[in-house]
Image (cartoon, coloured by chain):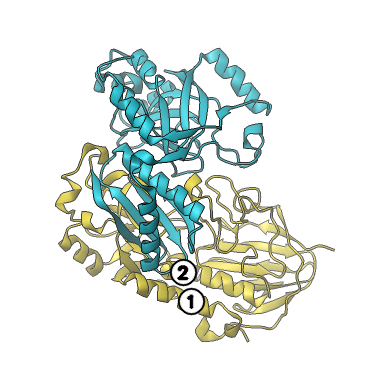
Chain colours: A yellow, B cyan
């Protein structure tokens, strides 16, 4: 009998995501979507023996309660959400066999913010534009376009997982319990719109993550920005405020300056707009964004393009069978 | 102004922004779109996505397949192969889109903003006055008197950023501050140099001057025009707005709802930048619609 998962409680914005997300449609206005913490997501798939691109669930801040209709193997990674299986604590970072009728319950995230659930065979929603990733702002992908709702059910593909495997301790992201995070950024593309003392201030300051943050953008609170002369002495086509620029494409990870408020553009962000991007967060630092909570503090560290690419490779190397025992 | 040589700006470890100049000269967009086309034809190694705009192109790449430096070299080679901007020819379809100008629905949206957020005049009258036009009716004549060039499809799915190809129809206007919290679906908005069409009922900052009953994207691919695509327009397409009345709006809206609406999109044309520029040079700039 094919496996389905019944959604008893949907949790807060629990969504189907796949790796790496939706590519090839950026120039039609579609963001990549995909799992915010791709490190934890990939390890979950590896644990249950899925292909890297198999779809799983991203659980945010408060996880779902799910019932499984048939035997399968699951793995939960990422944030700690006090998960239980039929009331017994469920080990994280481990593949676990599930019997028909068993209930997986998760609660509030106590460490980190986003947990990832992989199921052997992968969540089998129809791909839209080449991906199963949910882009709920436009009702695309995932389960009928949106986050899970109570009472829905999820189809799962065929696949046999192996229970009892775990991720080696030092191959997991070290998800801190709130506090201060170091976020690596590459300077640019529009760093020349900020005065040198403004650039220095960006690196030297603490930036607080605001509550109004989600998979579209991460709003930060911090000191005033100091613009370069260029930001004011510009043609009218760029707009009035120093942070305005003629519409241009937004790299994913841009620190997008909207007036005085920096917004880090993440997985579901608009592809373009009329504000400057003086810095871009390294893709290898995205898991830290994904696992932080409102009021956490960011300190930004400058890295070169090549350093950022090396950091990405290091994480890629950890998302392999060698990390599993 | 066009730069002597394009600038290559890093956007983290996965993006390069190629900037051809620092203003809204239309040639810069032609170059960005020419490079986009060249990258696709070349199937440049490591490139996973492209995102063109007014004067730039953002290229996303896999650093495991190509280094930042090698990608820049490849892009420079492709830009060199474009030749002069006048030699560019771009695939360009022409889409006819029905519009009720000065419509009651966006008028309500502006009135709602005025009542709840901050008082403002009716957008078409305000934009007409700013641009030295007689009245809102002339604004509608001017706006519908040209083909609009799709500079980019961006921000949200299917949303076109357009500019008039006929320089006599250029209008400019500031954007809302603060922005609207909601916008009539299908609203035609103008802001800065651009015209756009609201494909989602979300927030917005452009001045609203009309409304179209037709969708610009359809993830369910229900209407015939979406058989092989999800989004109606591509960058380098052109849009001609066809003024209609409210009765026609209702008729088309019903055809969209029952899934029988046939879009008029001509798909056999190529846009010659050289021929376009010759035509622009021949125009009497004082001519008014």
Place residue B27 in its image quadrant: top left
Tell me which residue sits at (30%, 71%) in the image. A301
Mark yes or no: residue A250 visible.
Answer: no
Q: Is residue A55 left or right of residue A78?
A: right
Image position of A100 (left or right of B179): right
Depth check, front residue: B279 or A239: B279
| Residue drawn where x is 47% and y is 43% of the image | B156
Is residue A234 in view from this perspective? yes
User: Could you say which disc has been placed on residue A287 in the image?
Assistant: 2
- Mark 1 falls on what kind of element? helix
State whether residue B137 is above or below residue B109: above
Picture quadrant where residue A264 is located: bottom left
| Upstream in sequence: badge 1 or badge 2 | 2
Q: Are marks 1 and 2 in contact (CB under 8 Å)?
A: yes
Read off the residue under disc 1.
A315
- The chain holding disc 1 is A
Mark 1 is surrounded, within 10 Å at the Cα level, by few (under 14), some (14 to 19) or many (20 or more) other residues, namely some
Task: Single out the mark in the foreground, 1 or 2.
Answer: 1
- Provide residue A50's location: percent of width, then percent of height: 67, 71
Residues at marks 1 and 2 on the same chain: yes
The residue located at (22%, 47%) in the rendering is A242
Q: Report the chain holding disc 2.
A: A
Classify the position of the C terminus of chain A by image quarter: bottom right
Residue A292: x %, y % from top left: 43, 67
Residue B121 point in image, percent of width and height: 31, 21
Query: Residue at point 44% right, 49% down?
Result: B36
Q: Is residue A220 above or below residue B171?
A: below
When the figure is inspected, residue B288 is found, relative to residue A188, above or below; the finding is: above
């Amino acid at each position: 009998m094919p496996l389905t998962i019944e959604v008893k409680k949907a949790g807060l914005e629990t969504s189907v995501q796949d790796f790496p997300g939706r590519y090839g449609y950026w120039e039609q206005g579609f963001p990549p979507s995909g799992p915010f913490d791709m490190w934890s997501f990939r390890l979950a798939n590896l644990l249950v023996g899925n292909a890297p691109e198999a779809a799983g669930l991203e659980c945010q801040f408060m996880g779902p309660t799910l019932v499984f209709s048939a035997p399968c193997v699951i793995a939960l990674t990422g944030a700690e959400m006090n998960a239980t299986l039929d009331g017994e604590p469920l080990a994280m970072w481990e593949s676990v066999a599930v019997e028909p009728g068993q209930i997986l319950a998760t609660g509030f995230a106590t460490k980190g913010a986003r947990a990832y659930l992989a199921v052997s065979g992968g969540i089998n929603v129809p791909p839209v534009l080449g991906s199963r990733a949910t882009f709920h702002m436009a009702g695309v992908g995932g389960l009928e376009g949106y986050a899970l709702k109570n009472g829905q059910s999820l189809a799962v593909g065929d696949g046999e997982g192996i229970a009892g495997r775990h991720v080696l301790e030092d191959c997991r992201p070290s998800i801190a319990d709130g506090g201060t995070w170091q976020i690596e950024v590459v300077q640019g593309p529009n760093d020349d719109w900020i005065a040198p003392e403004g650039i220095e201030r960006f690196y030297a300051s603490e930036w607080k993550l605001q509550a109004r943050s989600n998979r579209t953008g991460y709003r930060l609170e911090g000191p005033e920005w100091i613009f370069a002369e260029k930001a004011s002495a510009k043609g009218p086509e760029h707009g009035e405020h120093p942070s305005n620029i003629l519409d241009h494409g937004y790299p994913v990870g841009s620190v997008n300056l909207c007036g005085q408020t920096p917004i880090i553009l993440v997985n579901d962000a608009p592809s373009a707009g009329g504000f400057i991007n003086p810095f871009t967060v390294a893709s290898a630092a995205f898991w830290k964004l994904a696992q932080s909570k409102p009021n956490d503090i960011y300190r930004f560290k400058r890295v070169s393009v090549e350093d950022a690419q090396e950091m990405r490779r290091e994480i890629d190397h950890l998302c392999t069978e060698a990390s599993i025992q | 102004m066009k730069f002597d040589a394009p600038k290559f700006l890093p956007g983290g470890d996965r993006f390069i922004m190629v900037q051809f100049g620092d203003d809204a000269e239309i040639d810069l967009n032609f170059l960005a779109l020419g490079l986009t086309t060249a990258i696709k034809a070349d199937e440049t190694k490591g490139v996973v996505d492209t995102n063109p705009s007014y004067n730039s192109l953002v290229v996303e790449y896999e650093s495991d397949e190509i280094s930042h430096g090698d990608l820049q070299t490849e892009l420079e080679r492709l830009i060199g192969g474009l030749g002069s901007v006048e030699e560019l020819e771009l695939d360009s379809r022409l889409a006819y889109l029905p519009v009720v100008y000065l419509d009651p629905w966006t008028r309500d949206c502006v009135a709602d903003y005025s009542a709840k957020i901050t008082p403002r005049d009716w957008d078409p009258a305000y934009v007409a006055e700013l641009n030295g036009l007689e009245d809102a009716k002339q604004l509608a004549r001017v706006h519908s008197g040209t083909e609009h060039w799709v500079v980019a499809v961006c921000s949200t799915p299917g949303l076109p950023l357009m500019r008039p190809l006929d320089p006599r129809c250029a209008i400019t206007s500031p954007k809302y501050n603060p922005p609207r919290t909601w916008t009539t679906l299908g609203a035609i908005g103008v802001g800065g140099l651009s015209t756009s069409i609201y494909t989602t009922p979300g927030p917005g900052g452009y001045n609203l001057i009309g409304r179209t009953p037709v969708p610009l994207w359809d993830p369910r691919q229900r209407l015939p025009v979406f058989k092989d695509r999800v989004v109606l327009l591509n960058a380098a397409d052109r849009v001609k707005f066809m003024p209609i009345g409210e009765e026609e709006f209702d008729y088309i809206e019903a055809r969209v709802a029952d899934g029988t609406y046939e879009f008029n999109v001509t798909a056999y044309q190529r846009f010659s930048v050289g021929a376009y520029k010759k035509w622009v040079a021949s125009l009497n700039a004082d001519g008014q619609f």
